[in-house]
Image (spheres, coloured by chain):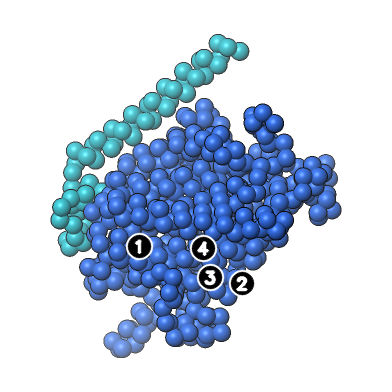
Chain colours: A cyan, B blue
């Protein structure tokens, strides 16, 4: 598994080679950000539709 | 079968497979050109639709011979700066390497793939200048971009021996800077001199929308571009066994700098970035489909520099940011510089590509090079690389188009624009209904 971003970087012994692959906490963080974006955009679109519905 | 026969058979299969891969990726990349053509024809008003299509066809046609004449040589010869390496004739058009050889099955397909990369740069530029650039001057500038400028940037930053790579660890595997920044900022330099279309701005500085004649063409075109980009990205990888500089045991694909990579990393991050960009632009534009499609492209470019190393969740977020920022960036560029970029090419490719280059330094610093000759990726390296790509695009775009403007060889006269380019210059019309 990799170690970047980190102090000692190398291709030796690498398997999962993507960013933060050695930090499950960071991967959970990015996963939660993805979910938050999807929920926020869906909510935002629904609010926009409701507002335009009231105007017209 | 003897061991010798088996070794020969495996070598032949490997060589032919690599050749076939780049052949197919080249074919797939033609979809990018089809897409740009449809996109720009749709974004043009009916009176200029044919002229926009002709311009695209000519960019394609001129790029191929000029890339054979000098474009490929520039890419190969200049990784160390402005002084060419001595390659003993390799890459010049009168050398045997620039024709089919039984002992070298790969040069031809590599040349073809790079030629299609060059066509992509010209197509990016093409959309920004529709409806008011002279066709001849467009062709000249497209050749300058696609067969000279881009190649120089690629030689410096998209080559295992390029000075940006060996000195700064510049990391741009899928060409966010090398293709998109250079093409986008080249277009910016040109349209500062070209000026807006007649009717775009009022005397008080306010802007009018000059809507294209058929948004459906643009929809299909943009989806074709996205499809074609899978060919572009596939051709950015080096077939197993051909790369792996200083890593003899490498049996995977490698990226263009020789470090391990996989098609999975490319497809994970391309799709996630594209989706993020489309959703970001949907939110920012409140559902404008033109920007959603452009956002999809910007999302791909946002992930392009680190397409080989991003976590897919991070790629989605980077793409989302890319899709969000291109809309205010486009508005800001129009407001400050009073430019006219009908397809948002500068925002999507120039700004989106810049974000992609910087994001690599922010989120993936420390990725090691393939060998000790290549430093780890860093934010500083990405900043230096980004500034270089901006200069390689903007300086020649602005400088050469300025000279052409002084010569009166750049812009279609206003009365021809008003009458329509199709009727005035081509004596044609796009449809008979």
Residue B271 visible somewhere in the drawing: no
Q: Is residue A42 above or below residue B187?
A: above
Quarter of the view holding residue B258: bottom left
Question: Which label sits on residue B149?
Answer: 4
- Subunit that carries the residue with mark 4: B
Q: Residue at x 44, y 86 (%)?
A: B88
Q: CA distance from mark 1 to mark 3?
A: 20 Å
Point out the image quarter for the C terminus of chain A. Answer: top right
Question: Which label sits on residue B71?
Answer: 3
Determine if marks 3 and 2 fall on one subunit: yes
Q: Residue at x 28, y 56 (%)?
A: B377
User: Mark 2 highlights which residue?
Assistant: B65
Percent position (x, y) of residue B200? 68, 36
Q: Residue at x 36, y 80 (%)?
A: B11
Point out the image quarter for the N terminus of chain A. Answer: bottom left
Instruction: Give the class, few, some or many, for how many residues have Cα within 10 Å of label 4's Cα (few <14, many ≥20).
Output: many
Tell me the element at label 3. helix
């Amino acid at each position: 598994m990799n170690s970047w971003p980190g102090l000692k970087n190398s291709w030796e012994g690498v398997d999962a080679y993507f960013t933060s692959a050695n930090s499950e906490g960071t991967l959970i963080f990015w996963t939660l950000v993805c979910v938050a974006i999807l929920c926020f955009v869906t909510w935002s679109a629904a609010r926009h539709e409701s507002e335009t519905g009231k105007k017209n | 079968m003897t061991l010798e026969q088996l070794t020969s058979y495996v070598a032949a299969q490997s060589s032919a497979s690599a050749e076939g891969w780049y052949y197919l990726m080249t074919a797939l990349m033609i979809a990018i050109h089809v897409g740009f053509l449809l996109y720009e024809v749709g974004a043009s008003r009916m009176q200029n639709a044919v002229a926009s299509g002709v311009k695209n066809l000519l960019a394609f046609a001129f790029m191929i011979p000029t890339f054979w004449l000098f474009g490929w040589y520039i890419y190969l010869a200049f990784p160390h700066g402005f002084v060419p390496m001595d390659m003993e004739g390799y890459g010049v058009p009168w050398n045997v390497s620039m024709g089919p050889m039984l002992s070298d099955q790969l040069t031809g397909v590599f040349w073809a793939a790079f030629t299609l990369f060059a066509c992509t740069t010209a197509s990016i530029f093409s959309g920004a200048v529709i409806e008011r650039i002279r066709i001849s001057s467009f062709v000249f500038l497209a050749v300058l971009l696609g067969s000279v400028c881009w190649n120089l940037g690629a030689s410096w930053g998209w080559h295992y021996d390029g000075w940006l790579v060996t000195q700064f660890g510049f990391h741009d595997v899928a060409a966010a800077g090398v293709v998109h920044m250079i093409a986008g900022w080249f277009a910016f330099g040109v349209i500062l001199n070209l000026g807006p279309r007649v009717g775009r701005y009022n005397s008080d500085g306010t802007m009018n929308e000059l809507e294209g004649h058929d948004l459906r063409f643009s929809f299909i075109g943009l989806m074709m571009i996205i499809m074609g980009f899978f060919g572009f990205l596939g051709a950015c990888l080096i077939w197993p066994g051909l790369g792996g500089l200083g890593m003899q045991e490498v049996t995977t694909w490698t990226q263009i700098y020789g470090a391990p990579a996989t098609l999975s990393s490319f497809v994970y991050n391309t799709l996630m970035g594209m989706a993020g960009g489309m959703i970001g632009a949907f939110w920012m534009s409140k559902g404008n489909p033109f920007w959603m499609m452009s956002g999809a492209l910007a999302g791909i470019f946002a992930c392009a520099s680190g397409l080989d190393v991003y976590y897919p969740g991070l790629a989605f977020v980077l793409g989302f940011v890319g899709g969000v920022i291109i809309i205010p960036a486009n508005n800001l560029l129009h407001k400050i510089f009073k430019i006219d970029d009908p397809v948002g090419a500068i925002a999507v490719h120039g700004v989106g590509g810049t974000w992609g280059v910087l994001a690599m330094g922010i989120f993936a610093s420390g990725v090691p090079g393939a060998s000790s000759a290549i430093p780890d990726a860093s934010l500083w390296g990405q900043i230096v690389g980004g500034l270089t790509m901006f200069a390689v695009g903007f300086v020649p775009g602005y400088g050469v188009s300025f000279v052409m403007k002084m010569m009166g060889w750049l812009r279609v006269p206003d009365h021809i624009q008003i009458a329509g380019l199709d009727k005035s210059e081509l004596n044609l019309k796009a449809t008979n209904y």
